[in-house]
Image (tube, rainbow, N blue to C red):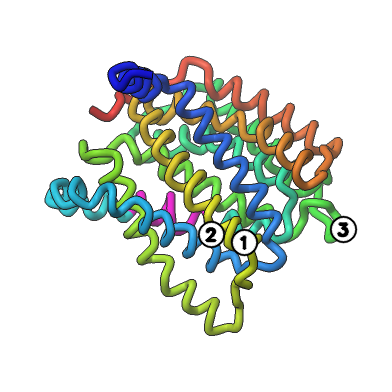
Amino acid sequence: MAPENRRGLGAALWSAPSLLLCVAVLGWSGNFVVGRMVGATVPPVALAFCRWLVAVVVLLPFGWRRLRTDLPLLRSQAPLIGVLAVSGITVFNTFVYIGLGTTPVVTGVLLQSVVPVFILVFAAVLFRERPGLTQVAGLTLSLLGVWIVVTGGQMVPTRSGPATGLGALWILAAVISYALYTAVLRLAPPVHPISLLLATFGVGLAFLAPFALGEFLLGARMPPTPGTIAAVLYVALVPSILSYFCWNRGVQLLGGARAGQYIHLMPVFGAVLAFVVLGEALRPYHLLAGAVIGAGIILAGRRPRIPAPVS
């Protein structure tokens, strides 16, 4: 393929929000599978720390010049960068890995599918975008679906429930954190995408470092096996660099509310990957919860207020 054709194809892909967002969600679905695979042997904070450390090391040679150029603007938006870094980098992935130590992938990706609903909540709280009655009804219905997931289909949580325990709650907290990241992303300064990634990755890594040190001092160790190394490389390159590039660009093109709807694909991608790779099966309560959450999402997505894309 001629260089000009390759550039034309790259520009077309960079301007195709649906494709970009699908790639992002597929990469994150794989992240849930890998997190579950190594959850019993790899400390969750160490996995998150190594993920972002490798991602920064890989990105820095390609982006340090742009980062240096954009640094004054990034510094002027330091509080915003801090919010993006803590919510999208430090908290979200660490909480997901903690939760996946005891929670099936299917449960995790079902909970992830309510991100768009919580985006509406943050848009209402932070930007005064008041939801309509149908959106409130959708939020309520989606939260009922979340309750079904967390309790394993029980009206009241029991110790024997398949999704009971802290695992699902850790992932739910991660979901809320990522909804905040996506809602606030519209305010990101107009810098180069790689500069924004390096800034948020680096700041998020700095916030995560004390917790990784504390985990290490408590005796948790990451075994230096080929499987562990492969897991770290995957989560650093695919769900970190590739997915965040695609997601940030997709949000830039469509706005947070519309882009958030693509999170609905996570239960589909995640369930298929979990079945193929881990042998996980869908339970009846998963299907019930998925139907309830889906109905809530349809209601919440009716006539949404679409935020303006970041220029």
Proximity of marks 3 and 1: CB atoms separated by less than 8 Å = no
Residue at 75 percent across and 44 percent down: it is 277
- CA neighbours of label 3 inside 10 A, class few (<14), some (14 to 19), many (20+): few
Was residue 185 drawn as part of the magenta stretch in this picture?
no
Nearest to N terminus: mark 2 or mark 3? 2
Which mark, by number, is residue 160?
3
Eye-nearest disc, 3 or 1: 1
Name the mark nearer the viewer: 2 or 3: 2
- Image label count: 3
Q: Secondary structure at mark 2?
A: helix
The residue type indicated by label 2 comes to Thr
| Residue holding disc 2 | 94
Please give the residue where the numbered disc 1 appears in the rendered image: 98
Is residue 244 found left or right of 275 in the rendered image? left
Instruction: Tell me which amino acid carries mark 3.
Output: Ser
At mark 3, the secondary structure is loop
Instruction: Please say if the residues under marks 1 and 2 sit with CB atoms less than 8 Å apart.
Output: yes
The secondary structure making up most of the magenta span is helix
Q: Amino acid at mark 1?
A: Ile
Residue shown at the point (38%, 36%) measured from the top left:
248
The quadrant in which the N terminus is found is: top left
Q: From mark 1 to mark 2, how far is it between C-alphas?
A: 6 Å
User: Dot 1: what SS?
Assistant: helix
Q: Is residue 89 magenta?
A: yes
- Side (left or right) of 276 relative to 188: right
Q: Position of residue 143 (x, y in %)?
A: 64, 38
Q: Nearer the viewer, residue 174 or 232?
A: 232
Question: Which stretch did the figure color magenta?
Answer: 83-93
The structure residue drawn at horizontal position 46% and vertical position 32%, both measured from the top left corner, is 120
Q: Can the viewer see residue 85 in this picture?
A: no
**Earlier residue among tags 3 and 1:** 1
Above or below, 34 against 183 in this view is: below
